Amino acid sequence: MPLQNLWVDVDKVGNTAKERLGYPTQKPLALLDRIILSSSNPNDIVLDAFCGCATTLVAAENLGRQWIGIDISPTACRVMAKRLRDVCHIRENEALWKIGRGFVTRGLPWSEEKLRQLPPFEFENWAVIALGGVTNAAQVGDHGIDGRIYPVSALPGKSGPDQLEFMDLWYPIQVKQKDKAGRPDIDSFEAVMTRENRPLGYFVAFDYSAEALAEIDAFFRKSHKIIKLLTVKDILEGELARKLA
């Protein structure tokens, strides 16, 4: 039977799926296999300009295509490289890339020092995008939410042609450009999670005080809501996918 417009035979990447990385927007490999097989020929070049965790690149490599992957997030680029090494067993090597047997990663200039120098709103956007989240359009009036993560498993809140715009399942992100986020910062985020009735939230800073860590533990014991702490170092060193899982 010819493929229809609606594909319902590709399973999502569930919690127990072997290919699961923990990356928030990860797509099933079977989905990208189908797209690439139906739209390209062997040795064609496949471009994914919003590449995330490299599912497109893995599918293209396995199906004998050449490929280029692009992502604004340094974390995503590092996740891509690791997945290509681990899953496709190809090496990140300039000499091998030149003869078509390896790959290279370009354009990862970010450092903690450079990120400290960014204007606050740009730093917030960098952190939210690195988490695979959606940034706020406005710099003010965000009600304590700097971004939102919409898991792939999110279900639309109502039906209709624009149903994907109304996903009810999302998690708040708070970003502080601080050497050590303290308890007052955590208290404010707890109020946001309580107000929005979110079971999970993400907080990004350079580091955290002991009082902040203790408050997060107390908040979980009291409310059973989870705040996952992430540092800039986690993002830059490729630990994000593991910590988001």
Image: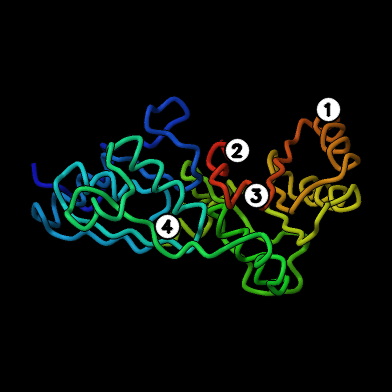
* Residue at the outermost top position: 16
Mark before the other along the chain sequence, 2 or 1: 1
Q: Nearer the viewer, residue 77 or 54?
A: 77
Mark in the foreground, 1 or 3:
3
Q: Quadrant of the N terminus?
A: top left
Mark in the foreground, 2 or 1:
2
Name above or below for residue 232 compared with residue 72.
Answer: above
Mark in the foreground, 3 or 4:
3
Residue receiving disc 2: 243
Residue type beneath disc 4: Gly
Decide if residue 138 is on the left or right side of residue 89.
Answer: right
Mark before the other along the chain sequence, 4 or 2: 4
Residue receiving disc 1: 221
Residue receiving disc 3: 233
Residue type beneath disc 1: Arg
Residue receiving disc 4: 160
Residue type beneath disc 2: Lys
| Residues under numbered marks 4 and 2 in contact, where contact means CB atoms less than 8 Å apart | no
Q: Nearer the viewer, residue 203 or 30?
A: 203
Mark in the foreground, 4 or 1:
1
Mark before the other along the chain sequence, 4 or 1: 4
Residue 236: percent from left, percent from top: 58, 52
* Residue at the outermost front position: 95
Identify the residue shown where x is 80% and y is 59%: 178
Mark before the other along the chain sequence, 2 or 3: 3
Mark before the other along the chain sequence, 3 or 4: 4
Specify few, some or many for label 2: CA neighbours under 10 Å numbering under 14, 14-19, or 20 or more: some
Specify few, some or many for label 1: CA neighbours under 10 Å numbering under 14, 14-19, or 20 or more: few
Residue at disc 1, secondary structure: helix
Residue type beneath disc 3: Lys
Disc 2 versus disc 1: distance between alpha carbons? 20 Å
Disc 4 versus disc 1: distance between alpha carbons? 40 Å
